[in-house]
Structure formats: C-alpha cells, structure tokens
Image (cartoon, helix red, strand yellow):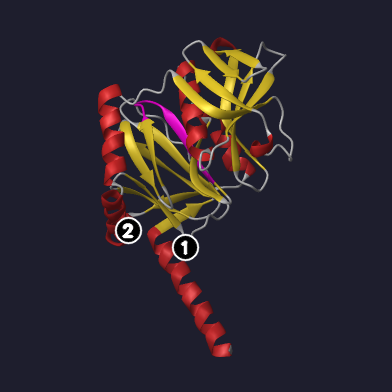
Amino acid sequence: MKIIAVGLFVLFLASTVHAGEHYVASESPAFPRPRPDRALIYFAKVGPTVALRDDDVFVDAEPIGYLPKNSYTTAFVEPGLRNVWSVTYHWFRFRAGKTYLLRAEKGVPDWFLDDPAKIRKVISKHRLTHVTTNDAGLIALRQTRLGAYWKKRQESRGMFDKVMKKAGQAGYQTLPLQLDNVVYKDRLKWYNWPWLSRRGRLTVNGTMVRWTSRKTVVEIPVAQIQQVSFEKLGTAGVAWTRIRYGPPGASRNAFLLSAVKAGYLYGHNRKFTAIRDALGRNENP
C-alpha cells in the first residue's frame, strides 16, 4: 500500500511538472487591448469541471492553450462563425473589434457567454490566475488533442454541415429571436426550479424584449436595458439570463431561463447574443 501511495504521488508530481513546462500561471492579471481586425476572447474557468486533467481550449483547429481550474486565458480570434471546444463543443459568432467573456463554471462544464464589462470583477472575485501557454504547450496540444477534434467533427458531420449551411444562407443572424418554453422571474430564490414555473414565449427584436404567457405579458424596451449577463443559481447548474433595465435610479431585473431538456446552455447563449445584438454595443474592460 505504501508503494502504491508513493507511486501515485510521484505520478501526480510528474504530471504537475509536465503541465508547468507547457504554461505559466500568474497571479498578476492581464487585459489586452482590443484589435479592430480581431475578436478578443476571455476564457475563464471557475473551479474544476468534469475533466480530471487540466482543460484545454481550441477554436476550430487552433489550440488556444491550457486552462487549469480557477484560471483564465485570452486570445485574438478571426471574426466569423467559430467552433469553441474543450470538454464540449459549441458554435459562436464573433465580430471584429469586440470583446467576449466565455465562462465555464464549477459543475457546469460548458461555455456560457457573459457581459464583458464583468471581466475584471469575475477575475477578482474568483481570484483567477492568468495562464499563458508557451510554444511547447501549443505543439503538445496539436499532437495530443487535435485528432480528437477531427474525429468529433466527422462524427457530427451532419450537424456541422447544417450549421454552416445556415450561416451561409442567413449570415447567422440572431434577430429576430423567438423561443418557447422560457421561464420568467422578476427575482430569484433558491427554490425557483424551472419545471415548477410558468412558461411562455420569448421574442427579441431590435426594439423590444417581450415574454408572453397565457395570463401575463412582460415588455422590456431595448432602449431601457442597462445590462444583460449570465446568472447561475444554486448547485443544479441552472443558467439564467439576467436583464437589468429601467430608468437610472429605478432599475429592475428580469430573469429568463430556457426550461427544456439540455436547453439551459444553448438557450442562454442564444438569448444573450440576441439581446446584445439588439443593444448594438460592446463594453471593454
């Protein structure tokens, strides 16, 4: 038993040193300036995800770097429809000159869009270290992980072709948006489980965010929206989209959730992107 324990310790130590050879983690935050020809992406991981190893991040077939727990990294990405993948695979449309915050939360190993104006707050609150992957680390990722990416692309070729066809036909437009089975709340409590809540239809266009059910209509003029952001509630990994709106000094909240199976992540990112596009603005940290 002692030999096994020592062996496991040596194995853990070796893997830690190996990871250290591929990236540098610094407690001093870094905030690159946006570039007019690229999208600036912040990848933030709060706590461990499902993977037992250090997560890594790719955009399409290009490695961005390693992302240990409680850390973040940044990258300049060509604008357009891009496949972001690490533990899971998701499509995002990035615009040149814009800044994006993608978060992977503890217990939710997926990428959630959040307000880029919260970047400094998220890094400070969760004490995220800034990770920079060196050339040796990028080469190692290409050698060890790139094959898994292409295999996944081949397995999901039908979905990939469908997404690209949609992007080519409609320019991957987010507006207008219409989603059914959306839960609305004006405040959140720990027992606000989506399957016990009233559902309705959400529509978003360039001037109005509207939620309608059989008995209730909630209308939020886009001109009154102050912020749209990610809001996680409890340990169930339920991802609410939070809208803060109203006149100065009298702001109100609206919380929206796509209450369908496996729809929390997808629904949040769609709602977030549509409302951000309606706002037509981008805050840089």
Residue at (54% x, 37% y) in the render: 260
Residue 259, labelled with which disc? none
The x and y percentages for residue 209 are 55, 16
Indicate the quadrant where residue 148 lies. Answer: bottom left
The x and y percentages for residue 70 are 56, 51
Residue 145, labelled with which disc? 2
In depth, the one of 33 and 148 nearer the eye is: 148
Graded by Cα atoms within 10 Å as few (under 14), some (14 to 19) or many (20 or more), the crowding at tag 1 reads: few
> Which kind of residue does numbered mark 2 sit on?
Arg
- Compare marks 2 and 1 and give the one earlier in the sequence: 1
Can you see residue 282? no
In depth, the one of 21 and 198 nearer the eye is: 198
* Horizontal side of residue 121 vs 206, given as left or right: right
The x and y percentages for residue 146 are 29, 55
Dominant SS in magenta? strand
* Location of the N terminus (image quadrant): bottom right
Residue at (58% x, 50% y) in the render: 106
> Which kind of residue does numbered mark 1 sit on?
Arg
Indicate the quadrant where residue 174 lies. Answer: top left
C-alpha distance separating marks 2 and 1? 13 Å
**SS class, disc 2:** helix
Residue at (49% x, 55% y) in the render: 68
Residue at (60% x, 47% y) in the render: 127
* Horizontal side of residue 243 vs 149, given as left or right: right
Q: Is residue 100 magenta?
A: yes
In depth, the one of 201 and 92 nearer the eye is: 201
Q: Which residues are magenta?
A: 94-104
**SS class, disc 1:** loop
Q: Is residue 66 magenta?
A: no
The residue beneath circle 1 is: 53
